[in-house]
Image (spheres, rainbow, N blue to C red):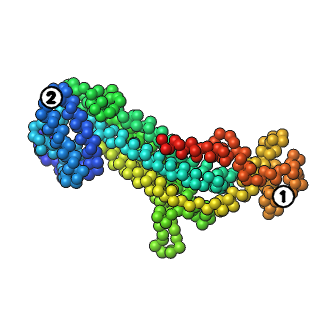
């Protein structure tokens, strides 16, 4: 279709290097949608008759039906999905099909299709994120009273309620949704009409096309419009962040499901065994998710590396954007789908978590606070409790087992009521600041998230 300038056929190896239809075929619905809008703009400009517009629209919709049915034959020698559809249209309806590309370049056509595709995918990813949030909130509500140690540096730190731990990931996923919504704003700008670089001498109504395609605005610089892939890189960043958050959750579940922790059991439906060791049950969903996060980050870095050295405006390097985008979307969608189902079947072991949370060392900071309330400067209180912990270790006794006399050796402000600090449920009830895991706060957060995610 582009042979006018050339005297030789494209070399077969060049065709194999150049073709992208093997992966960009998935843009077909959006290419057809954009082409119909472009045809209507040509008709509005008086460049297509009513009959020609009807032929083009009917022909494109018939091609879409054939692609969906699996009967359309994509031809690699036509390079991409755009040329395949245009060639098929011209073969089917004749001269009217050859008019479709008037005042349009593949440069602005590709940019439009990718924006339409990503705009649609934003809605898909958002729905999957909400489903995972719902699963986490449901797990929290189901285990509202469960307490476990919170960890810093993977060492027991302070007690928290299990729902509070799970809601931390709900918060992360909410930020992912916010980033996705923000990225969608920059995706949602209409580039068609920018031509190859400098528009066209044929004045098409770009605002009309934007209205047809439900774009709130059009791009304002034709050179930037055809070479901009910021929106694709931003989408890859959002997907990488989703993967990063799921990877962190995976790491928690892998540890908690281990024989050393025994806090949670992952359903057999989302686990695998060993080819050699019959006793094994492996958390494969979590491990695969953790591994795929590297792939998501790699796709982002790959696109950024492609973009960093491209001069104005369109360069063929930009063909490399799609495989990275398609792959990241595919990986995130399957992971989110499986993850939500897995979370809904998690079984937490209350007694094991409670036993770990009953470690009196987890309330060492509460002991320091006990002294602070009695007028001891925090640094002095911190030092006294640290020394008490060290002393208890030498005596092979926990803090709760030390006598009042032993406590008073380290600070005279200790009284007999210090042992009340070790009442775990009472201690949890005192964590009342906004964002802290008191029973009242956690219950309110669960209720609030449940209501929000039902909207």
User: x%, y% of residue 210?
Assistant: 30, 30
Please give left or right for residue 423 compared with residue 433 in the image.
right
User: x%, y% of residue 453?
Assistant: 50, 44
Q: CA distance from mark 1 to mark 2?
A: 92 Å
Does residue 440 show up? yes
Q: Secondary structure at mark 1?
A: loop
Q: Identify the image quadrant of residue 450.
A: top right
Do the numbered discs 1 and 2 sit on residues whose CB atoms are within 8 Å? no
* Mark 2 burial class by Cα count in 10 Å: few <14, some 14-19, many 20+: some
Does residue 410 show up? no
User: x%, y% of residue 78?
Assistant: 19, 47
Please name the residue shown 58% across and 46% down the image. Answer: 446
Please name the residue shown 66% across and 45% down the image. Answer: 440
Where 404 falls versus 306 (above or below)?
below
Please give left or right for residue 379 compared with residue 98 in the image.
right
**Which residue, given by chain and number where applicable, does mark 1 sit on?**
402
- Circle on res. 299: none
Where 43 falls versus 153 (above or below)?
above
Q: Secondary structure at mark 2?
A: loop
Badge 1 or badge 2: first in the primary sequence: 2
**Which residue, given by chain and number where applicable, does mark 2 sit on?**
47
Q: Of 382 and 171, which appears nearest the observer?
A: 171
């Amino acid at each position: 279709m582009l042979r006018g300038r050339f005297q030789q056929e494209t070399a077969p190896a060049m065709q194999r290097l150049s073709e992208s239809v093997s992966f960009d075929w998935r843009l077909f619905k959006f290419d057809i949608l954009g082409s119909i809008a472009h045809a209507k703009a040509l008709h509005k400009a008086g460049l297509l008759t009513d009959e020609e517009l009807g032929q083009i629209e009917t022909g494109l919709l018939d091609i879409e039906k054939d692609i969906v049915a699996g009967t359309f034959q994509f031809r690699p020698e036509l390079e991409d999905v755009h040329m395949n559809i245009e060639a098929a249209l011209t073969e089917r309806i004749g001269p009217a099909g050859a008019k479709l590309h008037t005042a349009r370049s593949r440069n602005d056509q590709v940019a439009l299709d990718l924006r339409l595709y990503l705009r649609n995918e934003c809605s898909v990813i958002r729905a999957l994120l909400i489903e995972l949030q719902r699963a986490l909130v449901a797990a929290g509500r189901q285990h509202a009273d469960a307490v476990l140690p919170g960890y810093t540096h993977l060492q027991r730190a302070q007690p928290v309620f299990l729902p509070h731990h799970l809601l931390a990931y709900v918060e992360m996923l909410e930020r992912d949704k916010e980033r996705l919504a923000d990225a969608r704003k920059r995706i949602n700008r209409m580039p068609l009409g920018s031509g190859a670089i400098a528009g066209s001498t044929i004045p098409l109504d770009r605002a009309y096309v934007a209205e047809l395609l439900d774009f709130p605005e059009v791009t304002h610089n034709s050179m930037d419009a055809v070479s901009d892939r910021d929106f694709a890189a931003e989408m890859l960043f959002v997907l990488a962040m989703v993967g990063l958050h799921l990877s962190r959750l995976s790491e928690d579940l892998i540890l908690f499901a281990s024989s050393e922790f025994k806090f949670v059991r992952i359903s057999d439906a989302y686990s695998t065994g060993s080819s050699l060791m019959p006793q094994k049950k492996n958390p494969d969903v979590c491990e695969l998710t953790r591994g795929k996060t590297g792939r998501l980050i790699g796709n982002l870095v790959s696109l950024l590396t492609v973009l960093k050295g491209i001069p104005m405006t369109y360069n063929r390097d930009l063909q490399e954007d799609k495989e990275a985008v398609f792959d990241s979307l595919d990986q995130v969608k399957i992971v989110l789908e499986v993850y939500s189902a897995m979370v809904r079947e998690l079984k937490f072991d209350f007694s094991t978590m409670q036993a770990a949370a009953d470690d009196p060392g987890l309330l060492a900071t509460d002991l320091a606070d006990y002294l602070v309330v009695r007028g001891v400067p925090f640094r002095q209180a911190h030092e006294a409790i640290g020394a008490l912990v060290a002393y208890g270790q030498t005596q092979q006794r926990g803090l709760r087992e030390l006598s009042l006399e032993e406590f008073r050796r380290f600070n005279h402000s200790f009284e007999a009521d210090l042992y009340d600090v070790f009442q775990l449920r009472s201690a949890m009830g005192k964590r009342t600041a906004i964002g802290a895991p008191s029973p009242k706060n956690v219950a309110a957060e669960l209720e609030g998230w449940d209501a929000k995610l039902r909207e």
